[in-house]
């Protein structure tokens, strides 16, 4: 029986990945997280976590080398999904040092600990980001894997470091490391600091009378290609199980491209409230924006046979219902 170590298991992607592995495999799951992380995304797995039959939480921090060593020794992993990160680009403008420390040095900590362990030969997924490509000229669309990096935020710079570290360790130390640049992916459990989840949350708050019929937004002109988080974790699973190639790197993303404003208009069209106004909030604008995020994912599809299953419309409806369900319970939420 295989063991899998997931760093960042409490996040949207980590929790959905745990769901998929529990459903599709008999693997044992070890989730690496900080002791004070919110476990809200894992509440539906409380029985499994409490019984420790299939899933066990290991507490530590990606910035603490000794806790990583302990997690590796306890999990004895055949597979590692490295999802832990400071993942919000906007925050990286305010906290660039913490972002670089967590995403670059944290990744180096993990890879160095694995390199010096008896689990060096495990299959390792390093989660980079489409943000590494940053400001891409229109003539280079759709973005393929060989597109030059032009990161447009400290977060993107940190993920460029993450990306390069993964490929370096694969080549230098004969480790089976695979790197992905996932483009925009969303759905239930998406953090409210990200645009589409913030919009869905605000709409739900308006419907419940918790906010005036105004939605606060940033840049609505950026182009994004949207994927569902449930398709994303399926891609990650296929990445490590479909003939994994050491050192390989892939773009992964959905098939529906539109402006952020078009995505917002679709969400508003699904609201039970009419006459919702849109208000530009300068605090939601980035100093520099990666505004053309359209992927070429043919390399990954050809290697694995992966195809997204969720439509843009279904993803957005599920995201909106996720926030509606939260508010139905009377849960108090911040207006942001």
Image (cartoon, rainbow, N blue to C red):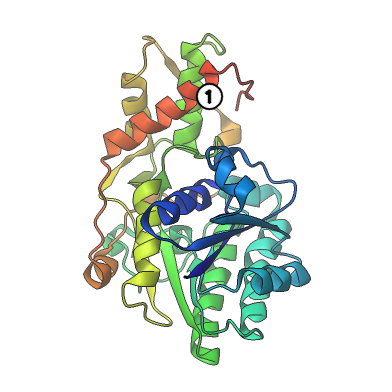
Instruction: Tell me where residue 38 sits by quadrant.
Output: top right
Instruction: Tell me where residue 236 sits by quadrant.
Output: bottom left
Q: Is residue 250 visible?
A: no
The image shows a total of numbered marks equal to: 1
Find disc 1 in the rendering and name its residue: 326
In the rendered image, the vertical position of residue 106 relative to residue 265, given as above or below: below
The image shows residue 130 at horizontal and vertical percentages of 43, 59
Q: Residue at x 22, y 70 (%)?
A: 302
In the rendered image, the vertical position of residue 240 relative to residue 195, given as above or below: below
Q: Residue at x 56, y 28 (%)?
A: 281
Q: Is residue 29 visible?
A: yes
Disc 1 crowd rating (10 Å Cα; few below 14, some 14-19, many 20+) is some
Identify the element where label 1 is drawn.
helix
Q: Residue at x 25, y 40 (%)?
A: 311
In the rendered image, the vertical position of residue 313 relative to residue 91, given as above or below: above
Instruction: Tell me where residue 239 sits by quadrant.
Output: bottom left
The image shows residue 284 at horizontal and vertical percentages of 56, 35
Quadrant location of the C terminus in the rendered image: top right
Q: Residue at x 57, y 42 (%)?
A: 47
Looking at the picture, tell me which residue is in the foreground, 75 or 125: 75
Indicate left or right for 29 with 305 as reference. right
In the rendered image, the vertical position of residue 47 relative to residue 121, given as above or below: above
The image shows residue 180 at horizontal and vertical percentages of 42, 66
Indicate left or right for 250 with 328 as reference. left
The image shows residue 101 at horizontal and vertical percentages of 70, 64
């Amino acid at each position: 029986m295989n063991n899998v170590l997931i760093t960042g298991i409490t996040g949207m992607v980590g929790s959905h990945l745990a769901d998929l592995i529990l459903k599709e495999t008999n693997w044992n799951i070890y989730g690496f997280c900080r002791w004070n992380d919110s476990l809200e995304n894992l509440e539906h797995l409380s029985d499994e976590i409490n019984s420790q039959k299939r899933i066990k939480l290991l507490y530590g921090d990606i910035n603490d080398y000794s806790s990583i060593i302990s997690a590796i020794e306890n999990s004895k992993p055949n597979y590692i999904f490295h999802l832990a990160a400071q993942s919000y680009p906007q925050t990286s403008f305010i906290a660039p040092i913490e972002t670089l420390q967590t995403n670059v040095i944290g990744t180096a900590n993990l890879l160095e600990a694995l390199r010096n362990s008896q689990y060096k030969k495990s299959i390792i997924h390093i989660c980079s980001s489409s943000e590494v490509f940053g400001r891409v000229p229109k003539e280079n669309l759709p973005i393929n894997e060989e597109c030059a990096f032009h990161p447009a935020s400290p977060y993107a710079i940190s993920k460029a470091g993450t990306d390069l570290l993964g490929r370096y360790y694969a080549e230098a130390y004969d480790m089976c490391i695979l790197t992905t640049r996932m483009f925009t992916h969303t759905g239930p459990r998406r953090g409210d600091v990200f645009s589409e989840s913030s919009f869905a949350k605000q709409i739900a708050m308006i419907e419940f009378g918790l906010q005036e019929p105004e939605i606060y937004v940033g840049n609505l002109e950026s182009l994004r290609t949207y994927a569902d988080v449930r398709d994303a974790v399926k891609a990650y699973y296929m990445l490590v199980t479909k003939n994994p190639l050491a050192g390989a790197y892939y773009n992964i993303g959905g098939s529906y491209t539109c402006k952020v404003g078009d995505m917002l208009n679709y969400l508003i069209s699904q609201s039970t409230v009419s006459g919702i106004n849109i208000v530009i909030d300068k605090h939601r604008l980035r100093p520099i924006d990666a505004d053309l995020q359209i992927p070429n994912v043919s390399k990954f599809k050809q290697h694995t046979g992966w195809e997204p299953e969720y439509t843009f419309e279904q993803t957005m409806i599920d995201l909106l219902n996720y926030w509606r369900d939260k508010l139905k319970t009377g849960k108090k939420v911040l207006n942001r």
